[in-house]
Image (cartoon, helix red, strand yellow):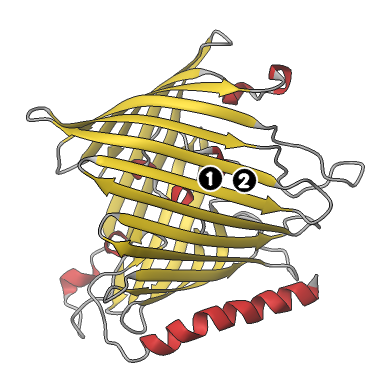
């Protein structure tokens, strides 16, 4: 296991070295995108060398998602505050930014999410230390107010974690052949187990290519061992935007060695935006299909073996989203999710047919 970690560390260094060296010949940049997140919301490298008093003023953002769900197969319903997030971010220096984000109600539970410092040593490069989203999967990296559907895909929600504590290096090139790369090393135990010591850390890397104006492609890799089994996860995704359409697909392969059968996950969806003249700025029509085979989160059972802790499932989601005009972001999402199982008796009550009506406000 230690030998595998050494090999992965060397591989990570080899992959990043050309980009780090190339970045040394550039100056500061106004904006940069790392992990598919616009840095302007989380502090950015300023063009000035001396900050004025107003440059120290933090930016405050928030997202509230409130929803009603009706489980049609169970005949049950509930109200829920899915998110009540507040974040503060900004700069303390032209090349030093910070962000802290807390969710006051993630399904009724308070959670500390992002808490990191980000440094921009040269143009196009960002170094981040702290709690952050792991650079893996396009759907995983979307913030709640940027989601197309009320619930994330199986691929993002069930097969890989959203956040961890660690260090990442990101670099973005915008000239000639645009691309971005970000890689990091993490504890691998999530956000709330930071006192333990580790000899089997998690590694993640993501590369995004923009070969032309209408196409975006990504390659992702993650290796982690929350218990005693190291899992290797590979992901490839692509999307295209044209004439009001957004078409996206993503495939994931999760390998456990010879102790458990590999997990496959696939998601694909189509979104069409129709502009509206009054009240609402647009109405979006959406359709999604996603599937996941039997999954394990990396923990052994009482017998010391890996067993299925997330059964295979398929889902079809249809919906519409009504969006209000700026200056604030507000959406009304109406989704219906239809699930398919081989054995309905083992189905999680939260993953059965349901109607979801959700209001999203972002400020």
Query: At 27% across and 40% down in the image, what residue appears?
Result: 245
**With respect to residue 337, does 235 lie above or below?**
below
Q: Which residue appears farthest toward the bottom when viewing the image?
A: 25
- Residue 234 in picture, x, y percent from top left: 60, 57
Q: How many numbered tags mark residues here? A: 2
Residue 106 in the figure: left or right of residue 270: right
Q: Residues within 10 Å of mark 2 (few under 14, many from 20)?
A: many
Q: Quadrant of the C terminus?
A: top left
Say which mark, if any, is on residue 159.
Answer: 2
> Could you say whether the residue bearing mark 2 is in a helix, strand or loop?
loop
Say which mark, if any, is on residue 62.
Answer: none
Q: Are marks 1 and 2 in contact (CB under 8 Å)?
A: yes
Q: Which residue appears farthest toward the left when viewing the image?
A: 277
Q: Write down the residue under mark 1.
A: 156
- Residue 56 in picture, x, y percent from top left: 24, 70
Query: At 67% across and 32% down in the image, what residue appears?
Result: 312
**With respect to residue 268, does 129 lie above or below?**
below
Query: At 90% across and 47% down in the image, what residue appears?
Result: 304
């Amino acid at each position: 296991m230690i030998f595998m970690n050494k090999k992965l560390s060397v591989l990570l260094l080899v992959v990043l070295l050309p980009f780090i060296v190339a970045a040394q010949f550039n100056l500061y940049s106004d904006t940069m995108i790392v992990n598919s997140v616009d840095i302007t919301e989380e502090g950015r490298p300023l063009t000035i060398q001396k900050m004025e008093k107003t440059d120290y003023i933090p930016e405050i953002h928030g997202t509230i998602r409130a929803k009603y769900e009706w489980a049609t197969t169970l005949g049950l319903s509930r109200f829920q505050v899915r998110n009540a997030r507040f974040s503060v971010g900004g700069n303390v220096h032209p090349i030093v930014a910070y962000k802290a984000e807390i969710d006051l109600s993630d399904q009724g539970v308070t959670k500390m999410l992002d808490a990191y410092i980000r440094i921009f040593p040269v143009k196009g490069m960002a170094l981040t230390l702290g709690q952050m989203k792991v650079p893996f999967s396009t759907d995983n990296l979307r913030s709640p107010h940027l989601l197309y559907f009320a619930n994330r895909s199986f691929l993002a929600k069930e097969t890989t974690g959203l956040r961890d504590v660690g260090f990442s290096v990101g670099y973005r090139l915008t000239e000639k052949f645009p691309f971005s790369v970000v890689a990091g090393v993490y504890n691998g135990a999530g956000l709330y187990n930071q006192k333990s010591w580790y000899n089997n850390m998690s590694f993640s890397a993501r590369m995004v290519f923009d070969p032309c104006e209408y196409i975006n492609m990504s390659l992702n890799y993650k290796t982690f061992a929350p218990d005693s089994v190291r899992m290797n996860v590979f992901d490839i995704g692509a999307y295209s935007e044209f004439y009001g359409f957004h078409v996206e697909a993503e495939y994931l392969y999760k390998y456990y060695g010879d102790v458990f059968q590999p997990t496959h996950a696939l998601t694909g969806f189509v979104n069409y935006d129709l502009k509206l003249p009054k009240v609402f700025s647009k109405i979006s029509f959406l359709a999604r299909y996603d599937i996941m085979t039997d999954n394990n989160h990396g923990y052994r059972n009482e017998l010391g073996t890996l067993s299925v802790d997330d059964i295979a499932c398929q889902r079809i989601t249809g919906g519409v989203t009504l969006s209000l005009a700026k200056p604030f972001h507000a959406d009304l999402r109406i989704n219906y999710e239809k699930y398919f199982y081989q054995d309905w008796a083992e189905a999680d009550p939260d993953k059965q047919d349901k109607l979801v009506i959700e209001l999203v406000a972002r400020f």
